[in-house]
Image (spheres, rainbow, N blue to C red):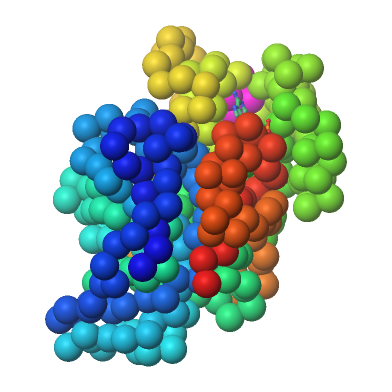
């Protein structure tokens, strides 16, 4: 089968087309004909060796994909041939608390990922996807969507009438905008580009702030809420944004610590966390149980993931470059089938 894999070292130039033997499903396993994959920032870090420099190679990158079950092994009962399913980011995290073994069972490193014509997975490592979604849309759910869901719903307790601030207009943030909106919250979006803010407003955002023109965007967000502050910040910026997030958030509010796009080590005034009763909540994607709950909401609200562009399988390196340049709004997908 055809794959894209990282071969012989890290770097964008090492992401190349390759061939692997067609996989066969064993006991408890299923064979998927892959239809589409989607990219996450983590996949860029993996290809360039910044996510895990000790990752053995070759590796098929990408955690997210959707495929059709075309064969099932012995003793498979959860899914059947013909089902359309998405991959579970952490293959062993089905429910319950996050634990080390569950969090290490991730696709696209250390396990081979979704940029392949076929995949064999444990029957427990997939989730049926909502029928109204295209393959490319469904392929965006495993990481970015579930992360936004975990931040806002599983852990975040966002309620109608809340104000949620999302940073930038990438995959996680646009899902957070869409999900916060169906939860009845109003959403403030930050972006480096005016045209992306326009798109976010068209999607239902309540306000937009250009974080390049307004370096004090946290203060600005607080002003927008009449001085009270926002209830929840979806933090994807990390070191370069946390200080402003603390200015934006209300007393007793929450910061979901998701990404570190601008750096992973921050010097922050801990007294402002203490005095303001702020909860900073780290999280890593979510469990299958969360994925299934999210899919029910997506189906009921007919939520459509925002897919900026779908690349062909052969154009995979171009898709990675497109994302690295930050040209996308929402998600970037790759058609596989
Ligand atoms: N913890 C988890 O479970 C989890 C899951 C998924 C992702 N993540 C992390 O979350 C982050 C975002 O991932 P993603 O896949 O959504 O990325 P993405 O789609 O590539 O989004 C990148 C966007 O973030 C915005 N951005 C970049 N630097 C920023 C800054 N300093 N301040 C505000 N916005 C900034 C930009 O938006 P504009 O172009 O609009 O300015 C950029 O287009 C990454 O660090 C990723 O590793 C973590």
> Residue 123, relative to residue 316: is it above or below?
below
Q: Residue 66's spot in the image, x, y percent?
A: 47, 69
Residue at x-position 55% and y-position 76%: 130
Q: Who's the residue at 42% across and 76% down the image?
A: 33
Residue 330 lies left or right of residue 291; in this view the side is right
User: Does 244 appear above or below 120?
Assistant: above
Q: Quadrant of residue 70?
A: bottom left
Residue 40 percent location from the top left of the image: 50, 45
Q: Residue 270: percent from the left, percent from the top?
A: 42, 13
Along the viewing direction, whichever of 275 and 18 lies nearer the viewer:
18
Residue 318 lies in the magenta-colored region:
no
State the residue at coordinates (58%, 46%).
Answer: 319
Comparing 147 with 62, the one in front is 62
Count of marks placed on residues: 0
Does the image show residue 231? Answer: no
Q: Quadrant of ligand 1?
A: top right
Residue 136 placement: quadrant: bottom right
265 w.r.t. 231: above or below: above
Image coords of residue 218 (percent x, y):
66, 21
Residue 64 seen from this side? yes
- Which residue is pictured at 29% across the width and 62% down the height? 20
- Give the quarter of the figure containing the N terminus: bottom left
Please name whichever residue, 308 or 217, is drawn nearer the observer in this view of the structure.
308
Q: Indicate whether 294 appears above or below 71.
A: above
Where does the magenta region start and end? 245-249
């Amino acid at each position: 089968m055809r794959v894209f894999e990282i071969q012989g070292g890290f770097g964008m130039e090492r992401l190349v087309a390759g061939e692997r033997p067609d996989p066969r499903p064993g006991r408890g396993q299923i064979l998927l004909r892959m239809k589409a994959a989607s990219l996450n920032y983590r996949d860029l870090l993996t290809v360039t060796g910044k996510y895990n420099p000790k990752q053995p190679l070759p590796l098929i990158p990408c955690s997210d994909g959707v495929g059709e079950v075309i064969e099932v092994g012995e003793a498979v009962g959860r899914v059947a041939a013909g089902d359309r399913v998405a991959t579970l980011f952490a293959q062993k995290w089905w429910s319950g608390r996050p634990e080390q073994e569950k969090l290490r069972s991730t696709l696209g490193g250390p396990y081979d990922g979704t940029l392949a014509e076929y995949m064999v997975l444990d029957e427990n490592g997939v989730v049926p996807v909502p029928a109204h979604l295209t393959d490319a849309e469904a392929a965006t759910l495993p990481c970015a969507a579930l992360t936004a869901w975990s931040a806002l719903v599983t852990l975040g307790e966002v309620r109608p009438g809340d104000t949620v601030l999302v940073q930038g207009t990438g995959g996680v943030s646009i899902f957070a905008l869409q999900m916060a909106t169906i939860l009845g919250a109003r959403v403030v979006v930050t972006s480096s580009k005016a045209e992306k803010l326009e798109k976010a407003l068209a999607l239902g955002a309540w306000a937009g702030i250009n974080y390049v023109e307004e370096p004090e965007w946290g203060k600005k967000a607080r002003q927008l809420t009449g001085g009270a502050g926002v209830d929840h910040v979806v933090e994807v910026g990390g070191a370069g944004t946390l200080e402003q997030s603390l200015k934006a958030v209300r007393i007793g509010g929450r910061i979901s610590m998701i990404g570190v796009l601008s750096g992973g080590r921050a010097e922050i005034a801990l007294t402002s966390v203490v005095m303001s009763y702020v909860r900073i909540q780290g999280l890593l994607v979510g469990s299958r149980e969360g994925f299934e709950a999210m899919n029910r909401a997506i189906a009921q609200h007919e939520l459509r993931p925002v897919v900026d562009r779908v690349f062909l399988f052969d154009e995979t390196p171009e898709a990675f470059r497109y994302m690295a340049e930050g040209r996308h709004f929402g998600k970037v997908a790759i058609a596989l089938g």
